[in-house]
């Protein structure tokens, strides 16, 4: 078989940092244990990279959104440790949950009827306390189909946990009123930012996502969370511009003088969106500014401060998520999940 040429872009995943982040979040969760949101291919960083590291660090509760995400996670952890946030839409999903042993998260009375009619069994239950996405309305809790469920974890989801908002307290109090109304084994409310709100929000299980992968949702996490993902790309060409030459689509950069530039094999098809215009790459400690617009597969950078850099050398895009969010105005969530499939992870 002909050998595939080596890639010219890669996403370095620091699994030691990932494990550190889970342990830090678990410690911040106090008497509660920390689970892990591993939906969207572990926020774009790769199930096969991340789930084993989380498992080996001690995590025992894993949450995906879609049923299609289940098989990749089951390659690494037992089915009883996996739950599906979107719940069963049809009997096909209910039968799949029963066949595999994963736990559906029931989000509505209709889903409760579907689960019970398919044979019932252990499940989780999502209550809406104000975010108005998925979840059972509080007024529906008394429905016989809900009361018949074998609820392992009763949960809700905070809408504004990354803000100093009165909504957090309102949701907490609403959730507390639900607890005695539904038979359940454990309760769970806090996402990543919710962990930082304190022990009242922790209950038995917290469900961090963003902070596992290097996100810093609030100041409460400063210094506790390590960077996990580092995009790197090879320089595929260097060239010298003359004064007055322009770069890229719409000629938005004009060289003020003769200057050496490089082209890296990375672009918005890889999730490095045009919002990165005005940012910089790094070569060691040297900053290499982006010139002109980001293209689909290429970005031009200024090599003036790195005269020794050559074609085939690798540069890094600074991806400390809080700083990158400020640079691009993208959310930390988007910065992770838009990263494309051409990266070798």
Image (spheres, grey):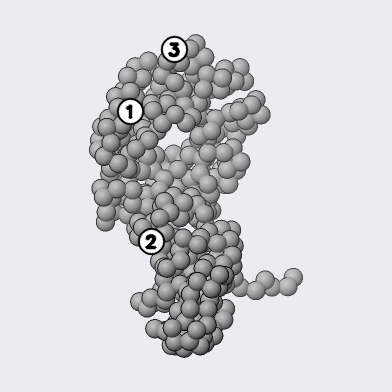
- Tag of residue 44: none
- Inter-mark Cα distance, 2 to 3: 48 Å
Indicate the quadrant where residue 175 lies: top left
How far across and how far down the image is residue 94, in percent?
61, 27
How far across and how far down the image is residue 114, in percent?
59, 20
Q: Residues within 10 Å of mark 2 (few under 14, many from 20)?
A: some
Q: Quadrant of the N terminus?
A: bottom right
Closer to us: mark 1 or mark 3?
1
In-front residue for pair 22/326: 326
In-front residue for pair 291/230: 291
The residue identified by callout 3 is 142
The residue identified by callout 2 is 327
Residue at 59% across, 31% down: 97
Q: Looking at the image, is mark 1 or mark 3 earlier in the sequence? A: 3
Residue 53 shows in this picture: no
Would you say the residues marked 1 and 3 are in contact, meaning their CB atoms lie under 8 Å apart?
A: no
> In the image, is 72 to the left or to the right of 330?
right
In-front residue for pair 322/12: 322
The residue identified by callout 1 is 171
Q: Looking at the image, is mark 2 or mark 1 earlier in the sequence? A: 1
Q: State the count of labels.
A: 3
Disc 1 is placed on an element classified as: helix
């Amino acid at each position: 078989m002909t050998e595939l040429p080596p890639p010219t872009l890669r996403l370095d995943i620091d699994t030691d940092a990932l494990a550190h982040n889970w342990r830090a979040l678990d410690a911040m969760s106090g008497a509660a244990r920390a689970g892990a949101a591993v939906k969207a291919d572990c926020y774009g960083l790769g199930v096969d990279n991340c789930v084993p590291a989380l498992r080996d660090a001690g995590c025992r509760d894993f949450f995906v959104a879609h049923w299609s995400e289940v098989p990749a996670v089951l390659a690494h952890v037992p089915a009883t440790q996996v739950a599906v946030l979107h719940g069963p839409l049809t009997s096909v999903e209910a039968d799949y949950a029963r066949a595999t042993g994963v736990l559906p998260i029931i989000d509505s009375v209709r889903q409760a009827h579907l689960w019970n009619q398919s044979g019932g069994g252990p499940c989780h239950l999502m209550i809406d306390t104000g975010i108005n996405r998925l979840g059972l309305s509080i007024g529906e809790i008394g429905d016989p189909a809900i009361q018949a469920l074998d609820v392992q974890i009763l949960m809700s989801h905070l809408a504004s946990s990354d803000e100093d908002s009165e909504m957090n307290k309102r949701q907490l109090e609403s959730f507390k009123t639900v607890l005695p109304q539904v038979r359940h084994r454990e309760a769970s409310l806090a996402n990543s930012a919710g962990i930082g709100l304190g022990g009242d929000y922790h209950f038995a299980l917290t469900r961090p996502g963003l902070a596992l992968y290097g996100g810093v949702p609030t100041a409460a996490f400063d210094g506790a969370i390590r960077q996990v993902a580092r995009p790197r790309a090879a320089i595929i060409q260097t060239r010298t511009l003359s004064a007055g030459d322009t770069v890229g689509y719409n000629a938005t950069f004009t060289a003020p003088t003769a200057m050496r530039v490089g082209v890296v094999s990375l672009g918005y098809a890889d999730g490095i969106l045009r919002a990165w215009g005005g940012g910089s790459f790094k070569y060691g400690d040297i900053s290499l500014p982006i010139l002109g617009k980001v293209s689909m597969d290429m970005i031009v950078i200024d090599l003036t401060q790195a005269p020794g850099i050559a074609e085939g050398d690798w540069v890094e895009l600074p991806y400390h998520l809080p700083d990158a969010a400020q640079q691009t105005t993208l959310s930390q969530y988007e910065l992770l999940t838009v990263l494309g499939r051409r990266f070798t992870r």
